[in-house]
Amino acid sequence: MNYKTDVLVIGSGIAGLFAALKISEFAEVILITKKDKTESNTNYAQGGIASVIDSNDSFEKHIQDTLIAGAGLCHRDTVEMMVKEGPERIKDLINIGTKFTEINGKFDLVKEGGHSHSRILHAKDLTGQEIERALINSVNQRSNIILLENYTAIDFLTEHNLRKNKNLTIENKNCYGVYALNSQTNEVVKIQSKATLLASGGLGQVYLHTTNPKIATGDGFAMAYRAGVKIANMEFIQFHPTALFGSSSLPEFESRSFLISEAVRGFGGILRTKDGNAFMEKYDPRKELAPRDIVARAIDNELKKRGDEFIYLDITFKDKNEIIERFPNIYNTCLRLGIDITTEFIPVVPSAHYVCGGVMVDKNAQTSLNGLYACGEVTMTGVHGANRLASNSLLEAVVYSDRAAKSIKQFLEDKRVKLPEIPDWDDSGTLTQDERVLVTHTIKEVKHTMWDYVGIVRSNQRLQRAKTRIFYLYQENESLYKKTKIYNDILEARNLIACAYIIIKSAEMRKESRGLHYTIDYPNTDDNYLSDTIIQNRTY
Ligand code: FAD
Ligand code: SIN
């Protein structure tokens, strides 16, 4: 069954849901999501959402903290905009029923790495789940939002789908929706829309160890790449310093590592080597609360030097009841693994967590393709630079979702888009894949390659080796893709390969070390490279 609508939203995390709510005030919306509607990075967010709420805090302090974490690459104008619009968007979240933790009638504002002031609103250590609950509840009440679960966007519909227009440049094309796979029926449908909003989240699954759930296979970045939409700064992959070591023995953590929130360090947690020594002072005067790139690199260095598999995070010196009250999710999950965090150290390792780059958007969330807007983790807005400040991601998502909704309203009023007759999906001549193991092995190879060669510390040689392997996997998978009836794994393999390739290419372009990108061949920061690494044309 094909669909037509005013606005198609791709993704049911904070960015997609928040935008859909705002858009539904003036247009019909179809929102598609790859699995269950709650399955998203958002749902697992722990620490919280940063914003200037306390009267002793100031916009300028939040702006400065963001710029410092971003290691010189943030766009000051977009940082200012995000920080200043933040409090209004927090009000929106509260108005739809999000309950942030309060103490004595006041928000319990806490600190995380890189913040000079306590400004993180949270819902204990389940902030994302609470925001997602409130958003889905509100979306369910809007009769003009159709939410379709188990629909995976495959590629954008543009004029290139019309045979006569194959060679148009990006400036002369428009986005008219997507082809999407209904993963329950294995049918590919055409969803046509006057405007499309990409809110498909991150790509943590490109790496072997990640805090991101299974859906985070970078589909949006890959779709944009294939369509020739501008993408930037993909070399800046944020590794969270403290994912729980050994969480994979619990079934729900088979494909993602359980996060031990940075808020635990904000609460006073101390990082220790296996023999119990604190070490962060050697690396940065801010110690455990230095920005994430610094803490993750320090841990990586200690692990490599000592040949250990993990380091410890210690909060045993804090009051037991306070720990359980503040971090119930972390306390209970660790307990299920036999670790009582009130009396024992927590074994932790860095894990791929967030991508600072993405589909380039302007301040109105407009991409380089007409009719295509984007918000949330899939974007590069300029606010994160070379390293995102903790808890700025959820904030960026709501600020840009609101802006996307406003610009889509204007676009629909100005353009009066007429949808062209785009052909249905044609899979004649393809066969059902009966050796699916070929694809699952490809996915494993991508993850190992990226973990081994494109991790926290890089080199020219490692990047070259990764590129050769990824290109080989690309050729194999693409030839299979052309012959096969589409199913989710083969789509995801294709997207993971594209993301791996874009990350490597961007990393090769940056011949310096800055923020999250550290290479032993160019160990210093070099202000000759003080610009974004932009990829526009598809080169494979
Ligand atoms: P997501 O929430 O990931 O949503 C993406 C949606 O798109 C999903 O519904 C997915 O199914 C759907 N989708 C993907 N591909 C397709 C496709 N092809 N077709 C259809 N649908 C698709 N940030 C903070 O600011 N504070 C925190 O405390 C914090 N904690 C975090 C903890 C964890 C464990 C993780 C993983 C991240 C955390 N982050 C935090 C980062 C933050 O949660 C994410 O960056 C943010 O939630 C991204 O929101 P989003 O809406 O862009 O994407
Ligand atoms: C965390 O709780 O440590 C995650 C915060 C973030 O990613 O911003």
Image (tube, helix red, strand yellow):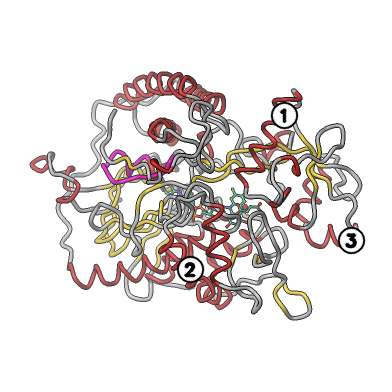
Q: CA distance from mark 2 to mark 3?
A: 36 Å
Q: CA distance from mark 3 to mark 1?
A: 32 Å
Find residue 321 and name its label.
3
Residue 468 relative to residue 322: left or right: left
- Ligand 2 within 8 Å of disc 3? The answer is no
Q: Relative to the observer, which residue lies in front, 444 or 521? A: 521
x and y percent of residue 152 in the render? 40, 45
- Residue type highlighted by circle 2: Val
x and y percent of residue 470 in the render? 42, 23
Residue at the location (34% across, 27% down)? 481
Q: Which one is earlier in the sequence, the residue at label 3 or at label 1? A: 1
Mark 3 vs mark 1, foreground winner is 1
Q: Quadrant of residue 349?
A: top right
* Callout 1 secondary element: helix
Mark 2 vs mark 3, foreground winner is 3
Residue on which the image places disc 2: 139
Residue at the location (58% across, 68% down)? 51
Mark 1 vs mark 2, foreground winner is 1
Up/down of 289 relative to 353, above or below: below
x and y percent of residue 306 in the render? 76, 25
Q: Quadrant of residue 127?
A: bottom right
Q: Residues within 10 Å of mark 2 (few under 14, many from 20)?
A: many
Magenta region: which residues? 222-234
* Callout 3 secondary element: helix
* Callout 2 secondary element: helix
Q: Relative to the observer, which residue lies in front, 74 or 428? A: 74
Residue on which the image places disc 1: 303
Q: Residue furthest left?
A: 164
485 magenta-colored: no
